[in-house]
Amino acid sequence: MLILGCTRPAIDVERLAREELGAPHGALIIFTPSTCSVDAQVFASLNTLDARPSARVVGLVGETDTSLTSMSALARDFGIRFVLRPLQPDRRALLQRLALAGQPVLLVVRRGRLRAIEFLGESRASDLGYVLGSDGVRTTSP
């Protein structure tokens, strides 16, 4: 179990990732669209991963305008085909601290366990190969 103890209160990141994903394999990306610097290919890689029957991708959006219309427009603008949800008010402060002032964060879950936390910043899809594997989330132990 991984707990980030430098935040107050501590965040049980593994539990949070499992709850948000609702699947044993996949990736959870937390980002703020207005400050998102993620390469479009990263979203394309996550779309490919989400298309696999054994994995799921969920995007949590840290913006105040998260109406259904705005979420649909956001998905269209970023080329996202995976599930997008707004950060829930009870988790927003905790997750925004994890996201380090707007820097996108990718949490990778394999076999129900948190296997990687990547702060994406200026990441490109090629940077994620060692985290996601060439075909998405690997289902073998690291």
Image: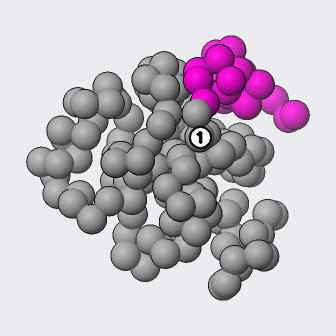
**80 sits to left or right of 58:** left
Q: Which SS class for mark 1?
A: loop
Q: Is residue 27 left or right of residue 130?
A: left
Q: Residue at 25% of width from left, 30% of height from top? A: 77
Q: Is residue 105 magenta?
A: no
Q: Nearer the viewer, residue 23 or 130?
A: 130
Bounds of the magenta segment: 123-142
Q: Quadrant of the N terminus?
A: bottom right
Could you say which quadrant of the image residue 72 lies in?
top left
**Which of the 4 image quarters holds residue 4?**
bottom right
Type of the residue with mark 1: Gly
Q: Nearer the viewer, residue 133 or 65?
A: 65
Q: Provide residue 129's location: percent of width, then percent of height.
A: 70, 21
- Residue 64 location, quadrant: bottom left
Tell me the residue that label 1 is attached to: 121
The answer to whether residue 111 is visible is no
Q: In which quadrant of the rendered image does the C terminus lie?
A: top right
The answer to whether residue 79 shows anywhere in this view is yes
Residue depicted at x 48% and y 19%? 41
Question: Is 131 within the magenta?
Answer: yes
Q: Residue at x 79, y 63 (%)?
A: 2
